Amino acid sequence: MAKKKYKGDGIYFLGQSSIDVTGSQYLVKFGNRQILLECGLHQSSSNDYLDSYKVNSAKFKFNPKEINYVFICHAHIDHTGILPRLVKEGFNGKIIATRNTSKIMKSLLMNCAYIVQDEARVLSKRYHREYKPLFDECDVLKTMTMVYEYDDYDTIIKLDDEVSFQWLKNAHCIGSAQLQLILQNNTKTKKILYTSDIGALHTKNHYVPDTEIPEMFSDITLMESTYGSDKRLSNKTREFDLDHLQAAVNTIIERKGSVILPCFSFSRTQELLTNLYLIYADNPSFRTPVVVDSKLSCEISDIYSDILSGTDYNLWEKVLSWENVMFISEKEISQNNLADNTPKIILSSSGFCTNGRIVNYLKKYLQDEKSMIIFSGYVGDNPSYLSYRIKNYSNRSTISINKEQIPNKADCITLSTFSSHANHNDLIKYGSSLNTNKLVLVHGSEESKKCLSDKLKMAISKNDKTYKVVCANKDMVIHI
Ligand SMILES: [Zn+2]
Ligand SMILES: [Zn+2]
């Protein structure tokens, strides 16, 4: 960023999320205050870790010591994963998050510390020079001591004379919130609404509330646009997907195969497990083991027990005590389970199958014509993702897994409605119902933002509103 641009009160679009769906990071400068809206890791879709490493290790475009607050609206790594590096480089302010985000974030960041150290080792070996890890577990622990938890939604909370905020409900994942930042000094008051990633307006997912459309006024709104493109518009309903899931599982059980569900450790694993429970728990003839095999998925599932309450807690406890369910955290038990040929349903991570225990399961079951792989939601947009290759290369006789050609015999289906993001129609409804002066689209591809922007302009004028829609660019500044 040119130095002259980096001055004055404004919103600075620093992260990759200005042009992409990862690496959320926006700097808000107001009077004497400097505030970061999230501090996320860039996760490149390329197989070469070097792309991501370069972005994630690049010098901060601000002095970490001068940042007063970092707001974290949900726990996903692309919104939190640079925090430990920020702390390592001198950040000494407050990290603001909900309690549930804080709990999940600790677990995900510890896992991320392991991954970034491993990636640095791989890079150092590959390029014969030292790549220092972005951070380690100690940095994560120090980061967690700087988190201040605020749990009340729809309530204005004053942090100091210039900075107040409120959380707004969000269905994206447990703990997630939209943020309204309220900045005031002697000369002006500015309100900034930041959606972070937003979930459905009427969610079908368990354990989260519906996303609310804020009624109060915000000068500027930053809104995510992951599903801004209408190309990925699905007319399927969750009910359709659940029927599809049940029919598929029944077929595979009948032919004595196994069902493999690659899924992310946080949210998707618990959601799929809950749905399997609701479909099969009352069926006494259903004896198939349902195995959650991932250390991180086990950890997050434990945190669910700790943070859920009321009917959510009751449902989750029933899922956990379902006699068919088995959680595997230990590596040795996982290896035994992999070697065992009893038909079963396996939920394992990662969702994109780029690493984790799921890769071993896919190596084994992809070559079994009795078995089926069931993806839920997005599988990536290019062949560097194993999930993408399995989903899109159904007509190929083999699929490459870790440079080995594996016979491609298992069936494969995708459940398209399992997303934690608001779909295209929800984005239009949300983005055209706001009370704001300027709507800035972030966290989406160029194509997504362009398509959404065109449709929003029409919907906004149809709703008799007049605010502007702008697509974010890298290093863009909006003065406030
Ligand atoms: Zn997210
Ligand atoms: Zn995101």
Image (cartoon, rainbow, N blue to C red):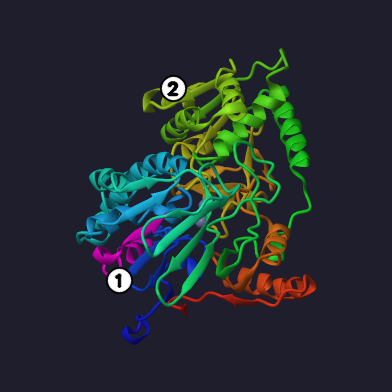
Look at the picture and state if 150 lies above or below 230: above
**Is residue 55 covered in magenta?**
yes
Residue depicted at x 69% and y 26%: 278
Residue farthest along the bottom direction in this orientation = 4
- Residue 335, horizontal then vertical, whole percent: 42, 26
Tag 1 and tag 2, C-beta contact below 8 Å: no
Residue depicted at x 59% and y 27%: 310
Cα separation, mark 1 vs mark 2, equals 50 Å
Query: Mark 2 or mark 1, which is nearer the start of the sequence?
Result: 1
Q: Few, some or many C-alpha atoms within 10 Å of disc 2 (few <14, some 14-19, many ≥20)?
A: few
Residue, disc 1: 62
Q: Is residue 7 visible?
A: yes
Query: Which amino acid is tagged 2?
Result: Asn
What is the magenta range? Answer: 51-71
Residue depicted at x 58% and y 64%: 223
| Marks 1, 2: nearer the viewer | 1
User: Which quarter of the figure is the N terminus placed in?
Assistant: bottom left
- Residue 37, horizontal then vertical, whole percent: 43, 61
Picture quadrant where residue 457 is located: bottom right
Residue farthest along the front direction in this orientation = 186
Picture quadrant where residue 407 is located: top right
Look at the picture and state if 422 lies above or below 247: below
- Residue 358, horizontal then vertical, whole percent: 49, 38
Query: Which amino acid is tagged 1?
Result: Phe
**Is residue 37 covered in magenta?**
no
Image position of 203 (left or right of 400): right
Q: Is residue 367 visible?
A: no
Residue, disc 2: 336
